[in-house]
Amino acid sequence: MLSTTLSLYRNAYSGLSPSTWWLSFIMLINRSGTMVLPFMTIYLISPEVGYSIGDAGIVMGLFGLGAIAGGYLGGRLTDRIGFFRVQMFALIGGGILFMLLGQMHSFTGICVLSFLLSMVNESFRPANSTAIAFYSNPENRTRSFSLNRLAINLGWAVGSAAGGLIAAYDYELLFWVDGFTNISAAILMWFLLPPSKTNSDKKEHVAAPDPSHSAYKDKVFLWFIVLTILFAACFFQVFNNLTAYFKNVLHFSEQYIGLLNALNGLIITFIEMVLIFKLEGKRSKLYYISIGVLLCGLAYLMLNVFNMNATLAIGMIVLVTFGEILAMPFMNSFWIVRTASHNRGQYAGLYTIAWSIAQTLGPFFGSQVAEHAGWTVLWWGVGGLCVVTSVGFWMMNSRSSESGVQSRE
């Protein structure tokens, strides 16, 4: 039994390029400092800072607007100057801006720096997605994205657990740690994946640019983007309004909230790669996406259906995590096969923008609903929207096999 399990894990992680592993290691270092975002809403509404949940929603909405601008900017720059330069700019610039944001106390200053920080930070995502695609092969691309997500979530687990302890001591310290890990990741990228790697690791076939092959003219991809926005708007509640609900309604401590966030990352760390290895190729990507989105919806509905306590909160986090595991890796591999070498940044940028729009709309409208209509209405709405979105992905899947997706390379 033990040997079978070890063999399964070994097979799940085999066949990935060294550069894919280095890229994931760099991501692990960066995300181990992810402490500001999950505690930003609690920080803003704390007695020391003194803003309302509605004000916090505005700030989180500006994070989203900056992310939209960053997704577009990052996608455009990636196709023009390459993914290495864009990632370096985003890591160093984001690190500096994190440190500056922690020094801001006026609402205007917090809003301005939140927008700028998010714009610079999110320009990293299209470049990083393009790098993952470059360093991987079609047969292991979903697992390459999963390995990157594993690094993100393992870092998230470390950062959330440590962030809960640091927040209980001094919220301002969170900003310094987040900034330091950003810059550390940039230094590691410079030494472990220098620009020469881009040219020497792999010779990729570059097709002649086809102006008609545009992300903005790909109707299947655009419908996919709409559904992604709806799902992501619901999913982003986990990082802000849900933590505020845990703190202010269920009265969990910052340490316990940090441990709940860490549980999410640990489940992904130990289960996602093996699960993806077992599932990939068995059914369509859209099938798994639909099931994952549905599980997230059921997790949110738990908040109203059950009399929530510390133990049931663990079950809720477990359910939303398995939904995330099923949905997100296959979402990445769904859009990547529609790209070509000359426009991958464009597709990656639009996909990043979809998540950024959700980051704008989700926290903002969620906080307004919570403030004016109550938490119960919010969780019925978010859970129901996930269910509707799951049906949308299911309809995409039923109308065509993989929506007619073929690699354009």
Image (tube, rainbow, N blue to C red):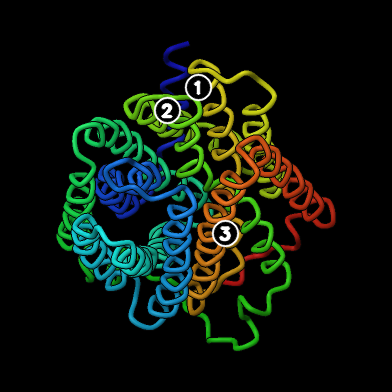
Q: Pinpoint residue 38: horizontal percent, then vertical percent.
A: 38, 43
* Residue designated by label 1: 314
Q: Is residue 311 left or right of residue 390?
A: left
Tell me the CA gap for discs 2 and 1. 7 Å
Q: Pinpoint residue 39: horizontal percent, then vertical percent.
A: 35, 42
Which amino acid type is marked by label 1? Ile
Label whose residue precedes the other's in the sequence (2 or 3): 2
* Residue designated by label 3: 361
- The residue nearer to you, when weighing 81 against 93, is 93
Tell me the CA gap for discs 2 and 3. 24 Å
What mark, if any, has residue 260 been given in the picture?
2
Element at label 2: helix
Residues at marks 2 and 3 touching, judged by CB atoms closer than 8 Å: no
- Residue furthest toward the right? 399
Q: Is residue 80 left or right of residue 324?
A: left
Element at label 1: helix
Which amino acid type is marked by label 2? Leu
